[in-house]
Image (cartoon, rainbow, N blue to C red):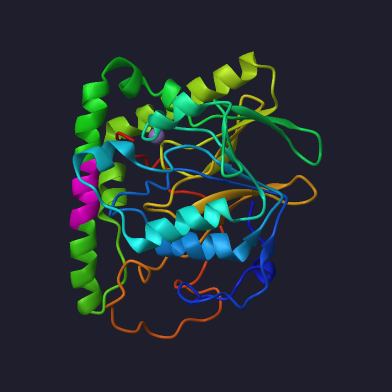
Amino acid sequence: MQRDLTSFPEPGMASGPHDAAPLKVRTVWISDLHLGTPGCRADALLDFLRSVECETLYLVGDVIDGWQLRRAWYWPQSHNDVVQKLLRKGTRVVFVPGNHDEFARRYIEHEFGGIEVVEDAIHVTADGRRLWITHGDLFDGVIQCAKWLAYVGDNLYEFTLRLNRHFNRLRARLGLPYWSLSKYLKLKVKRAVSYVSDFEHAVAQEARKRGVDGVVCGHIHHAEIRDIDGLLYCNDGDWVESMTALVEHFDGVLSIVEWGQSATPWLPQAPPQPAQAPGGALGPQPWQPPLPQPARVLP
Ligand SMILES: [Mn+2]
């Protein structure tokens, strides 16, 4: 599952045009971009979109955050740039709406500027495996049973992210490395563990019912590729905290790409960091197995 570092751009290219050789893959899945919120790491996302070449790009839901936009309009130029890039990517783009962009579910089976909007999709890998593509919120017990709780949790999550930004700005000023408050909190919340595993098993169970070999989803902001009782479970993560994508190489092999661990796109005023060895903590990182069950409490 480790990506090949040689085929990836060098670290420190998060801003400005990308000169490095593009990352060429057959398929890319991204989700949970949450455009329209201050939490969206639009600069890193734009850098990734400029650097990747693929035949098909799947947008696996929560691309535009209608929940947050309804509360307060937030739409900086960088978010516009991401949408423009998606529209002009020159590749097949398939959009599977999620719960934060459920307004788009009204346009299912339509096409907008070359983007196909579908409820869900089946993707056949180069080695013939059938993957069911769904955002995943339908298997989230909280959203299905208590939507009001999901809204409350969403506000709390935004608040934590905002606190985290201020906290890390301070840390950067003190010359300390980036530290994720929300990841820490999630590790502390024991209930989140069963929440995530319940979600993963529910998604896998539905995929098995549908007779596919695997499932690709998002929603819980936790990138992962794993086997659940013989079924391939893939989660492409998010562009709020982890900056991850799922990719399919030309031989059908799937892997997770983590686009930079640094806080630089977020903290333009941060002081220069000490020099890192190639592949150090500042650049795009090889995918690492996640810590035991870190989980988003309420996506
Ligand atoms: Mn979601």
The residue sitting at 18% across, 71% down in the picture is 170
Confirm whether the magenta stretch covers residue 162: yes
* Image coords of residue 148 (percent x, y): 21, 23
* Residue 285 in sight in this render: no
Main secondary structure type of the part rendered in magenta: helix
* Image coords of residue 97 (percent x, y): 47, 33
Residue in front for this viewpoint, 23 or 221? 23
Residue in front for this viewpoint, 184 or 169? 169
Q: Is residue 102 left or right of residue 134?
A: left
The range drawn in magenta is: 156-163
- Snapshot quadrant of residue 125: top right
Relative to 265, is 135 above or below? Answer: above
The quadrant of the picture showing ligand 1 is top left
The residue sitting at 26% across, 41% down in the picture is 68
Quarter the C terminus occupies? top left
* Image coords of residue 79 (percent x, y): 39, 57
Relative to 132, is 210 above or below? Answer: above
* Image coords of residue 279 (percent x, y): 55, 73
Relative to 147, is 62 above or below? Answer: below
